[in-house]
Amino acid sequence: MVKTIANLKRGQKGIIKDIDVSALPIKLLEMGCLPGNVVELMHIAPLKDPIYINVNGSHIAIRKSVAAQIELTIVDSITNE
């Protein structure tokens, strides 16, 4: 199974591995949804959509269908250097 932002649990982090640029709004790319950046799921709305993420220092609310287009490598913890 491919891991995506939509698969994250609250507080879980991942590194963006692959994206379909044509499927994402350009605003997400401008805000840092690019390969190699760390994403953390901050909150899930009561009806499960949208979800609230932190990517590259930006807090973004996105639809779960869009989040499912962004592939991740899920990590347990990331150290800051």
Image (cartoon, rainbow, N blue to C red):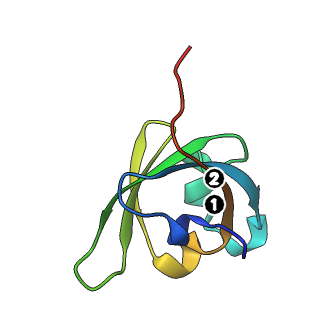
Does dot 1 land on a helix, a strand or a loop? helix
Q: Which of the 4 quarters of the picture holds residue 32?
A: top right
- Say which residue appears at 60% left-offset and 75% top-offset: 68
Look at the image and tell me in which quarter the C terminus lies: top right
- Say which residue appears at 77% left-offset and 67% top-offset: 20
Q: Is residue 23 left or right of residue 41?
A: right
- Say which residue appears at 56% left-offset and 57% top-offset: 28
Residue type at mark 2 is: Leu
Residue 66 spot, x, y in % from top left: 57, 75
User: What is the CA distance from the residue labelled 1 to the residue labelled 2?
Assistant: 5 Å
Residue 48 spot, x, y in % from top left: 33, 81
Relative vertical location of residue 24 with respect to residue 55 in this rendering, above or below: below
Report the residue that reaches farthest toward the bottom: 47
Q: Is residue 11 left or right of residue 47?
A: right
Q: Residues within 10 Å of mark 2 (few under 14, many from 20)?
A: few
Report the residue that reaches farthest toward the left: 46
Residue 41 spot, x, y in % from top left: 41, 56
Relative vertical location of residue 47 with respect to residue 45 in this rendering, above or below: below
**Residue under label 2:** 29
Q: Which of the 4 quarters of the picture holds residue 21?
A: bottom right
Residue 78 spot, x, y in % from top left: 54, 32
Does dot 2 land on a helix, a strand or a loop? helix
Relative vertical location of residue 49 with respect to residue 71 in this rendering, above or below: below
Residue type at mark 1 is: Ile
Label 2 near label 1: C-beta < 8 Å?
A: yes
**Residue under label 1:** 26
Total numbered circles: 2
Look at the image and tell me in which quarter the N terminus lies: bottom right
